[in-house]
Structure formats: C-alpha cells, structure tokens
C-alpha cells in the first residue's frame, strides 16, 4: 500500500483551475504510462533554458523546450501565475484556440501563442513529471504601442492676453511618455499673466500644456506625441486660436499708373476669427462696394494662421478710375480700414532745340604793285568752286582771255614787245551753280599800268564768266 501511494505522488502534477474531469483523465493517463516503465537508466535533462520573450500585441510567439533522455517521462506546459495546465506532451488541455503544441519526434517541444493579447503576459513552465519534478521557466511580456484617448478636445481658443490648457491622455505598455511640440518646428513660449516671456523651449514633457498671456503669434498647431519605445509613435494635433480685432496694413498708400494700363492694389489683414473683407471706391461712408467683374478682379491669399492679403486688380485704367480706394475688414471683435490713392502718372514733355549755323566766306583781292625787283608775271586767279564742268570749256575760256591780253599788248607795245605774253592761269575754274560772281586778279609784267588796260581786262573777265 505504501509503495502504491509513493508512485502516485511521483506522477502528480499541478492542475490549478482545470475541471475535475480533465484533471482525473490527465492523472490516469500519466500514471498508467509511468507504471509500465518505472525503471530508467538515465535521468532526463534540459539542453537549453527557456527564453524570456517580449512581443507586441497582435503578434505571434512561441517557447521552445529541448529535453534529452526523456525516456517514458512526459513534458507538460503550464502557465505558472494562474496554475493552469496548457498541454501534456502533444495533447492540448486548455480550450484556448490561440495555443498549440508541437513535437519534432526527437527532443524538442514547442508551445505556440498566436495573436498575442495583454492577458497572455506572465511566466510559462516546461515541466517533466520526474520525482522530484524537473522544470524550467520563461517570461512572456506583451507590449502595447501608445494610443491617445479621444476624450479630450482638440481645439482651444482665448482672447489675446488670455490662457488655454491642452490636455493629452495616452495608454500603452509600458506607460508612454507624453511630449508637446509646435508644428513646423516653431518654439513654445511660456509667459506669465502679464504676457512677459519667461521661457522659450522647443518641446515640453507632460500631459498638460498651459499657455498664458497669449499673443497672436502663439496661434497655430500644437502636437501631443506619445511614445514608449514600441512603434509606432502616436501623435495628435491641437489647434490653438487667439482672438483679436482686425488690423490692416497697406502695401503702398500711393500708386501711380498711366491710363490703359492694369494695376493691382493690396492690403494685408490680420484678424481672428477671419474677417469679412470688402473693397470700395472712395471713402467707406460714400463709396459703393466693388464686386468681381471684367473691370474689377477681387482675390485673397492666406499668408499665415491669422493673416490674409487682399488684392484688387483694375483693368484698362480710365480717367474716372483714378482716386481713393478703401479696403475694409470686420469680425466679431472690431473693424479696420485702409486707404490707397491711385494717381495717374504725369506725362513727360519733350523739348526740341534747333541750332542754325551760318558760314560766311570772305575773298580778299591784293592790290598789284609796281615796285617789284623781279619781272612781273601775269597771273589770273579765280576763286575755286565746288561744281565740276567739262575741261574743254575751261580751256576755251582761258584761251579767250589770253587772246584779249595779247591783242591789247600788241596795240600798246608792238608785235615784238617782250611784254606780249599770255597770262598764266594758276587755278582751274570750277563753276558754281549759284552764289556771288567770281573775282579774277591779273598781274601784268609791264611796269606801266593804265586805266584803259584795267577796264579792258575786267570786261574780258566778266564776259568769260558770263
């Protein structure tokens, strides 16, 4: 009787939470198998320890147990923290469909867990039913990527100078760290109630971000970032709106353009919430509101979270288009206006100055002298002209003059007189189509000069010219 109790104790296993029927069946199978092979020459041994595993939620994982010299003993898988038998040898005991076991027919047993859940975390045991019992344990850690709760609002607003508090709640395993950053890499500015800057940081760690003394440049997107080392990192956008009345800045108070040209007038508006904008011709009290048409093209451009650029394009300017234009903006916190004076470009006057230059030519005729020591020569000089004539005509005229002089010398001094020489012409005549008559000067070798000779020579010269 004592031997029987001892054998039953040797094959007992922890059942922890298994139904009574399952426990009984398990013990019967194991006991029956062990009774037929109670004598083993060598004890079983584990070849390698059971690993500690970490896996993200939703993934698959498995434990590997390698045993040598198992003989007739059996391997069981047990979850230690809940005292639950999962499998014995290749037989599944638990009813969890995500668990399974395999045996390679030699010395390796594996426990598979698919689509891991957080409740799968804990200590797992590979146990051999020897006396005393042999076992080894490995720990499974199931980690969960961070997630941000949607309970908190993602928008906050306050008037300029006020304050807002942004709250971000995140879950995950391990617990995530929450940090704050501004969109586009801008800094976070912490101020006191008087809007004085206290600290400027690139990022802030904490679940709640409090902004005081708000200014319009604090407006924009803030990011809540939750991270615990398990990808992916989670983030959420929070929009901060700072409320203030419109402010208008005019790009060019005075604009010059010529008629028949096109011009674009611009006003820069800052307002939150976004303002309703209009264009008017003249002052706002007297002018009419301008609408989009073929004459006026109205458009807006967003330049920041709280700034827009108003554009008014006027096509083919006429005289009546020149004057003042008013841009206006209004929201629930106030109204603002800006004025642009469109003027016509002054026309440039061109003055042409004409200068007349008069050239006067003077011809001087030297007086003949009779006190020369050398024999005088008769020279016939004629003022040069710019018009070319036939050379034959010039020679004929010169011959007529020489004949006249010879005729006079023969009548006066005789046929053999040494003074009977032809007058020499020093320059070829060039006839001008118009202008004053030409002047000829005759130098006579004769020391005797008579009035009749002078008159005759002058007559001949005039006749030749004519």
Image: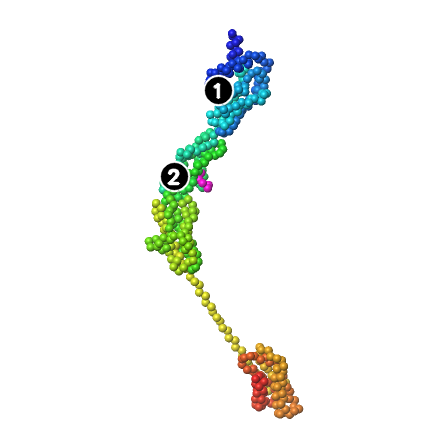
Decide if residue 322 is on the left or right side of residue 403: left
Q: Residue at x 53, y 20 (%)?
A: 91
Q: Tag 2: Cα neighbours inside 10 Å, few (<14), some, or many (≥20)? A: some
The residues colored magenta run: 181-185
* 434 versus 85 height, above or below: below
> In the rendered view, would you say 269 is above or below 48?
below
Q: How is the image coloured?
A: rainbow
- Image quarter where the C terminus lies is bottom right
Whether residue 265 is visible here, answered yes or no, is: no
Residue furthest to the left in view is 285
> Could you tell whether 405 is left or right of 242 in the image?
right
Tell me what residue is drawn at x 49 percent, y 24 percent: 97
Q: How many marks?
A: 2
Q: Residue furthest right?
A: 416
Position of residue 155 measured from the top left corner of the image (x, y, whole percent): 39, 38
Q: Which residue is mark 1?
A: 84
């Amino acid at each position: 009787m004592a031997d029987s109790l001892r054998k039953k104790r040797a094959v007992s296993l922890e059942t922890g939470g298994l139904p009574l029927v399952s426990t009984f069946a398990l013990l019967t199978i194991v006991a029956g198998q062990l009774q037929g092979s109670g004598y083993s020459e060598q004890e079983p041994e584990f070849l390698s320890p059971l690993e500690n595993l970490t896996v993200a939620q939703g993934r698959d994982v498995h434990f590997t147990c390698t045993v040598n010299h198992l003989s007739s003993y059996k391997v069981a898988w047990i979850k230690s923290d809940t005292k639950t038998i999962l499998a014995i040898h290749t037989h599944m005991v638990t009813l969890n469909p995500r668990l399974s076991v395999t045996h390679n027919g030699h010395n390796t047993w594996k426990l598979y867990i698919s689509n891991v859940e957080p409740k799968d975390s804990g200590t797992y045991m590979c146990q051999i039913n020897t006396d005393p019992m042999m076992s080894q344990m490995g720990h499974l850690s199931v980690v969960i990527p961070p997630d941000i709760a949607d309970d908190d609002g993602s928008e906050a607003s306050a008037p300029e100078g006020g304050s807002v508090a942004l709250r971000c709640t995140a879950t995950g395993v391990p617990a995530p760290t929450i940090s704050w950053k501004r969109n586009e890499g801008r800094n976070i500015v912490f101020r006191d109630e008087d809007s004085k800057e206290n600290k400027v940081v690139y990022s802030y760690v904490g679940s709640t971000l409090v902004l005081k003394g708000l200014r319009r440049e604090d407006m924009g997107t803030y990011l809540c970032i939750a991270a615990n080392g398990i990808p992916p990192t989670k983030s959420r956008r929070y929009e901060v709106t700072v409320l203030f009345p419109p402010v208008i800045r005019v790009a060019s108070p005075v604009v010059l353009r010529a008629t028949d040209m096109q011009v674009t007038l611009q006003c820069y508006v800052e307002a939150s919430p976004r303002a309703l904008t209009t264009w008017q011709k003249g002052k706002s009290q007297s002018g009419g509101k301008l609408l989009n048409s073929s004459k006026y093209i109205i458009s807006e451009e967003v330049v920041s979270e709280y700034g827009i650029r108003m554009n008014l394009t006027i096509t083919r300017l006429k005289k009546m288009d020149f004057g003042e234009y008013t841009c206006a903006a209004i929201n629930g916190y106030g109204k603002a206006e800006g004025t642009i004076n469109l003027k016509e470009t002054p026309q440039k006057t061109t003055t042409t100055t004409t200068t007349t230059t008069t050239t006067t030519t003077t011809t001087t005729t030297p007086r003949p002298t009779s006190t020369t020591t050398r024999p005088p020569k008769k020279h016939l000089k004629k003022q040069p002209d710019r018009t070319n004539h036939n050379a034959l005509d010039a020679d004929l005229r010169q011959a007529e003059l020489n004949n006249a002089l010879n005729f006079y010398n023969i009548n006066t001094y005789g046929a053999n007189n040494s003074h009977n020489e032809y007058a020499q012409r020093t320059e070829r005549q060039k006839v001008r189509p118009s202008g004053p008559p030409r002047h000829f000067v005759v130098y006579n070798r004769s020391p005797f000069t008579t009035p009749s000779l002078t008159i005759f020579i002058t007559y001949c010269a005039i006749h030749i010219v004519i």
